Image: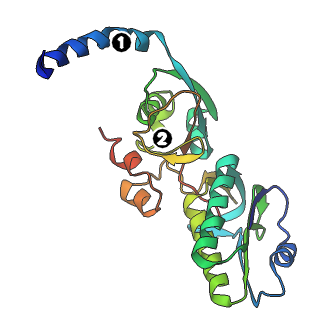
Amino acid sequence: MRVALVDSPIDVSSLISEVSGDSCGATSVFLGRVRNVNDGRSVTGIEYSAYRSMAEREMNAIVREAAERFGVSRLIVEHRLGALGLGDVSVAIVAAHPHRAPALDAMRFAIEQLKRRVPIWKLELYVDGTREWVGSGIGNRREPSEAGQMGIETPDVVATRTQ
Amino acid sequence: MNPVQKAPGFFVGVRAPRAGFILSETMTVTVLLFASYADALGRSAIELDVAPGSTVRDILGTLLAMPGGDRLPPRPLVAVNREYASAATTLQGGEEVAVIPPVAGG
């Protein structure tokens, strides 16, 4: 198990080599890439930033949880930060296991949890020269019920600030 | 002396020195802001001197009252020392309190 926040391009084939072993009949790979449209706006690139120390802590927790749930210890999660262009790989999840079901399940679990919990942000850059924080709490406020759906166990943050 | 009589005396006895302590001492916490929240307040870190016993909720109240703080949602996610924390969390001083915009990794 290994996680990393990286500032240079993610080398997917080296991750596959690193995670695989002779006992592993299955290797599953998820790649997140910068796409050219979001919410109908033409995107030219994304700048990723993070609360690094907490992001690494959460990513480590996620791979530990994946190991417990699915018995998959051959699991790597890498997320790239900084300025990325269209098509660049922003995140790679690679899981290997003797059988396909645990490898697929662990990979899916890791990316879904990453998107919910890991403090990483996207600043999207558009063709018209404007930029915007994706999902920003500003001008696009998250309602309490929505925060609850994120599965983050901070009910008091949501429930008691109204006092 | 029965407990009913004892209780008021005990309360008065400790109240004065404790109030004095609270008035004379402060503690410092480091508030970290990221992404859209850092843009809103125009900075990414703030050292706050607050009263002992302050909670995350108190810190948020201070932040929301700062210039640009009205652009933050009323109940943002918060992490204390890199762990998600509730608004009721009591701070001891020295903590790193991060106000976390909606995350968008991947």
**Most foreground residue, B18 or B1:** B1
Residues packed near mark 1 inside 10 Å, few (<14), some (14 to 19) or many (20 plus): few
Chain ID at mark 1 = B
Q: Is residue A121 visible?
A: no
**Most foreground residue, A163 or A88:** A163
Is A102 situated above or below A73?
below
**Relative image position of residue A67 (x, y in whole percent):** 64, 72
| In the rendered image, residues at marks 1 and 2 fall on the same chain | yes
Residue drawn at point x = 44 percent, y = 38 percent: B89
Task: For mark 1, give the secondary structure.
Answer: helix
**Most foreground residue, A10 or A59:** A59
Quadrant hosting residue A15: bottom right
* Screen quadrant of the C terminus of chain B: bottom right
Image-based side of B10 in relation to B80, left or right: left
**Relative image position of residue A118 (x, y in whole percent):** 61, 57
Q: Which residue carries the number 2 mark?
A: B72
**Mark sitting on residue B19:** 1
Is B86 situated above or below A73?
above
Amino acid type for the residue under numbered disc 1 = Ala
**Most foreground residue, B7 or A59:** B7
Residue drawn at point x = 82 percent, y = 78 percent: A16
Residue drawn at point x = 47 percent, y = 53 percent: A140
Amino acid type for the residue under numbered disc 2 = Leu
* Screen quadrant of the N terminus of chain B: top left
Of badges 1 and 2, the one in the foreground is 1
Is A160 situated above or below A40?
above
Q: Is residue B53 visible?
A: yes
Q: CA distance from mark 1 to mark 2?
A: 33 Å
Residues packed near mark 2 inside 10 Å, few (<14), some (14 to 19) or many (20 plus): many
